Image (cartoon, grey):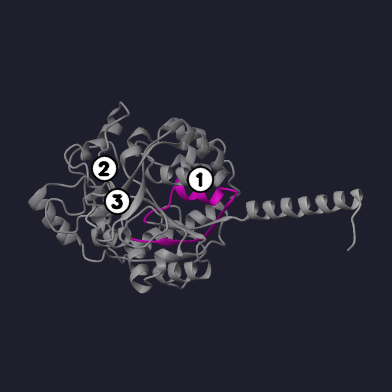
Amino acid sequence: MSQRGPSQLVVTLLVTLFLNVSLLRAVAAEPRRIIIDDDAFGLMHYMLLNAPDVEVLGITTVSGNTWANRVTAQSLRGLEISGDTDVPVMEGATFPLLNSEQLTQRFEGLYGKLVWKGAWMREWVEPTQQTQPTYYGPFEEVELPGGNAKIAAADEIAANFLVRMVRKYPGEISIFATGPMTNLALAQRLDPRFAELAKELIYMGGSLGPRQVLDNRSAAEFAREFVNSPRREFNVFWDPEAASIVARSPWRRIVMVPVDPSTATQITPQLKERLAAVASPELAKTIAGLEPGFPLWDEIAAAVWLKPDLVRESRELYVDVDTAFGPGYGNTLSWDEHYQPGLGERKNEVILAVDPPGLYELMETLMGNSDGP
């Protein structure tokens, strides 16, 4: 049996320490893989694309705020502006699973007008400082105001891409959904292991009991819709059946960002100036063109995923969606432990409040990371 002298032991310890440190660095350097599933392209995308430790594997588009083909065109142009043209874009579902424009009109005739109807929106119910929305058909040719992108979408259906990626990287991909959940529901029905193979789901959607926080007219306009309908939120209402399928899918972890924390945030002229000052020239033009007055719904979801210490209040709740057509159609359902029906509902980490100054600071940092033209 050989014996080691003190110098040999020191060398062995140093080599072991070096190997351990190298391993830790390698693990720390591994990017957080994410797929963005959304119905619009905006500041949230730039935040995630510019985050240094994040790898955006792709963007899947879905109808909601506007039609999927228009979201796809916006996403391609946004990637050109950010300089991330290597990120693929897959177009997803054009229509909800069951809901429709005609059914929504029937709902309004029976139960009252909706503040926002997304692609089905023709006019505001009452005067507002926000721009009158333009109504498009689901298959109209898209011509963006600043010109369409030179890059093209990938020739793959969004749901197929989602399934393929979680199979390729089991347990590694965060699904980041900030629009209706039609693509995710289709992926789950295509592959019952889809949710199980993902690392986690982070979604902006649902509503518990938001209240107006900011004291100005614009903020009041977007908080008033929840005074009498506190559980109704657009992303879920557009496709309640899809949202319910996703709510009952076997995710390892679910982070829900409802409307609630958004009423303490707002795109203001001052915030736009602050972000544009640090952004690339092309991105600064995009920021300058943003319409002020809207809450930062999706940006909050990105922020709490990137920097969890921005969360100021959260709860663990079981969540599902009311899919029975009636006055509560599309409403968010939630229960504390022991009170859920037991029909497959999953426990959510529900974000109820965030730190707005910290959110704005993070956005400023990430806009400054832009390497676009």
Tell me residue 273's x, y (percent): 49, 33
Separation of residues labelled 1 and 2 (CA atoms): 23 Å
* Closest to the observer, 160 or 147: 160
According to the picture, the residue beneath numbered tag 1 turns out to be 306
Separation of residues labelled 2 and 3 (CA atoms): 12 Å
Tell me residue 181's x, y (percent): 33, 59
Tell me residue 295's x, y (percent): 35, 39
Numbered badge on residue 208: 2
Numbered badge on residue 213: none
Quarter occupied by the N terminus? bottom right
- Three-letter residue code for mark 1: Leu
Residue 134 visible in the current orientation: no
Q: Earlier in the sequence, mark 2 or mark 3?
A: 2
Is residue 109 toward the left or the right of residue 244 in the image?
A: left
Tell me residue 277's x, y (percent): 55, 35
- Whether 42 is among the magenta residues is yes
Separation of residues labelled 3 and 1 (CA atoms): 24 Å
